[in-house]
Amino acid sequence: MVVQKTSVFPAGRDFVFQKLQQLETLQMIAKPYAAFEPIGETVSTWEVGSTSVYRFRLFGVIPFGTHTIHIARFDPDGVSSREGNEHVPVWNHDIQLVEKDESHTLYTDRVEIRAGWKTAFIWLWANAFYAHRQRKWVRLLNRSER
């Protein structure tokens, strides 16, 4: 199943891309739906070919396995990561960034989810999660100095 959400962000594509490179951005926009605690070597910025592992907690408290993120593509036009954990073996996340003008970016999250019999439940949660993430992105960008 696929989740897809699109929003117009109040910042230029380069600034959004700069924020996308930071682990702290993921941690901030995921709260309170999810928490990512690094295991082992911490990746402070994402780059193509990097793989990182996190203790994943639903709603910040419910243990939900060890989540692995492998970055397949990372450039100003978008990001592709191949992710998964014990409960959701396939979580392929693609982010598309389209510059509308120098102060607005069309941002799309597209996530392919495969989790066996749990897929429909995970899909429902993911729909709420990505809508939440994009709202948090807008708040973060409105507060950021550019």
Image: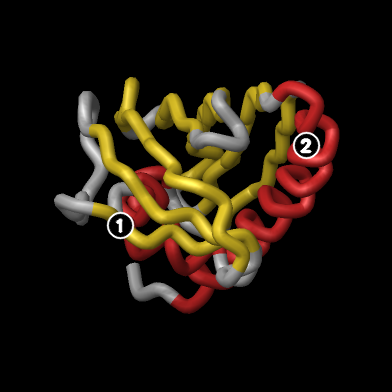
Residue at x-position 50% and y-position 47%:
65
Task: Report helix, strand or loop for mark 2.
Answer: helix
Graded by Cα atoms within 10 Å as few (under 14), some (14 to 19) or many (20 or more), the crowding at tag 2 reads some
Mark 1, residue position? 38
Marks 2,1: beta carbons within 8 A: no
Quadrant for the C terminus in the image: bottom left
Q: Residue 111's x, y, as percent?
A: 62, 29
Q: Residue 81's x, y, as percent?
A: 42, 29
- Judging depth in this view, the residue of 40 and 73 nearest the camera is 40
Quadrant for the N terminus in the image: top right
Q: Which residue type carries mark 1?
A: Pro
Residue at x-position 41% and y-position 51%:
16
Q: Residue 86's x, y, as percent?
A: 53, 35
Graded by Cα atoms within 10 Å as few (under 14), some (14 to 19) or many (20 or more), the crowding at tag 1 reads some
Q: Is residue 71 above or below residue 100?
A: above
Q: CA distance from mark 2 to mark 1?
A: 24 Å
- Judging depth in this view, the residue of 139 and 112 nearest the camera is 112
Residue at x-position 73% and y-position 32%:
3
Q: Which residue type carries mark 2?
A: Trp
- Judging depth in this view, the residue of 9 and 66 nearest the camera is 66
